[in-house]
Image (spheres, rainbow, N blue to C red):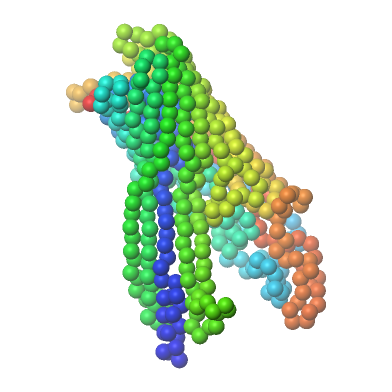
Amino acid sequence: MRRHTRLIALTVVLGFPVLPVDREARATSTMEIIGATTGGNQITARVLSHGSAATYFNPSLLPEATPKLEAGFFALALQSSIRLKARPDGVDVPSTVYWTDSPGRPLATADLPNARANTDADSNVVYAAIGLVRPLAGKSLVFGFHAFLPVRAFLDQKGFFVDEREQYFSNQLHPELLGDRLNVSSVAFALGSQLNDWISIGAGIDVAIFTVSKVTVYVPDGADQSHVLLAPDIHTDSKFKPYFAATVHPTSRSSVVATLHFPFSNDTQGENDLRFWNYAYPDGKSSVQQVYTISQGSEPLRFALGGSYSGRRLPDGRAPWEVGIQLLAERWSQYRDRQGARPLDTWNNTLNVAVGGGFLWRDRHVTMDVGYVPSPVPDQTGRTNYVDNSRLVASAGIEGPVKFFGRDLEAGVTLFGSYFLPRDVTKDPNAAHPVLDEYPDNAVDLRTGLPITDAAGLQTNNPGYPGWKSTGYMLGAGATFRIAR
């Protein structure tokens, strides 16, 4: 019997020894949420950036950026809440469900591993930023580099389901477009070129880390699964995603900008071959194949248009004041969720609007931004529970010359705030894809063949039923130091 136990364990494990995991750690989801933290105009950086952040947001602005080496820190606090509405009587799944062949295999509500609960998605993240702007051939060719890195985590990915399947795990709702998306490292390189007095162009690459992990697992004793032998193979490559920008100057005091960033996602794909000892598989097969996909940190196609207008430039080349407007269109209708599937109710394409400006105060540059970021998530009246809120965003900053150990530097501080507009969700039985009845009315007792009266009406363990309210905010502050190179 002992020998058979070991043989079963060996064949089951060796039946799926290779677990390929493809992970692309893209570099932009955090920066798209927070903006450019190393200079003024954090939110309208695609139009008004004058530092290394232009490397990512608009590389065609690099010829106008002052050649500097930048380093800074930014601290962000997130406070968000999801408050579930009280469940009505009669919707709990009773234990009689185990007597049926109910599709989906729900658990009795009393047997769920975690009780349905509210969510407080609170986190504090500190980032380090490093940037460089360096002319290679005057304004004809300027190199830019910008990295924005969470100090405590290079990449943080969370997986969860947005429907009744989450009952087997946390049994909570989770923010879809925040949370782990605030813990993604960002690295970008770009070149900008001023072709003549009225047009500049730029192109860059968003650096990705692509990892394939293959793990072979051997369990010597199926009765003692705490002891296993692992032989992992891990391979890491770099991948790149291009983006493009152009800036046109109709006059010496005005500009029109356009940027294009292509879509991406953090994808995990894998395949298991599962084989049990002494089992006859149909159709001559020797195993059951399991395939899975996880997609996280997905960003859509993004196209921005904007413009700026400034005062007549001073002899040192600085503008005494400037204002700008930025429109950012995002194609969320092609979004894939964390299981790599399209949402049942197609998401909306969105248009973000931001306005900003700055002025000189003595030797200091003062900036301010405000903006509106609409949620792409449609009303969640049906089966799914994608949690997201439209946001109001604002930033303010000041920067100027300072002395540090006798050396002339530039230093700046920036403040950032984002308020999540409250959202109230109520499930609708007439929705296009209503909440799934996990205990069908026609359920039959497999022992007696008789209908089960407990099955009448809606029974579900969907944690989002019958609805929820969500809101929250983000607050951030940062400091940046620059030195001429």
Is residue 480 shown above or below 290? Answer: above
Q: Work out whether 300 lies above or below 340.
A: above
Left or right of 62 on screen, residue 347:
right
Q: In the displayed image of the protein, which residue is found farthest to the bottom?
A: 1
Residue 459 visible in image: yes
Residue 400 position within the rendered picture, expressed as x and y whole percent measured from the top left: 32, 20
Residue at horizontal 61 percent and vertical 60 percent from the top = 165
Of residues 417 and 200, which is closer to you in this image?
Answer: 200
- Seen from the viewer's position, the closer of residues 178 and 350 is 350
Seen from the viewer's position, the closer of residues 79 and 278 is 278
Residue 427 in view of the camera: no
Rendered residue at 35%/33% (across/down): 190
Q: Residue at 66% across / 61% down in the picture?
A: 461
Foreground of the two, 54 or 41: 54
Q: Which quadrant of the figure contains the C terminus?
A: top left
In-image side of 75 versus 392 (left or right): left
Which image quarter: residue 4? bottom left
Residue 289, percent from left and from top:
51, 69
> Where's the N terminus, which quadrant?
bottom left
Where residue 423 appears, as percent x and y from the top left, is 64, 40
Q: Position of residue 96 (x, y in %)?
A: 72, 73
Single out the residue that lies furthest toward the left: 406
State how many labels appear: 0
Determine whether, in the image, residue 230 is placed left or right of residue 5.
left
Which residue is drawn at the image coordinates 52% and 77% (left, top)? 285
The image quadrant that residue 101 belongs to is bottom right
The residue at the far front in this view is: 284
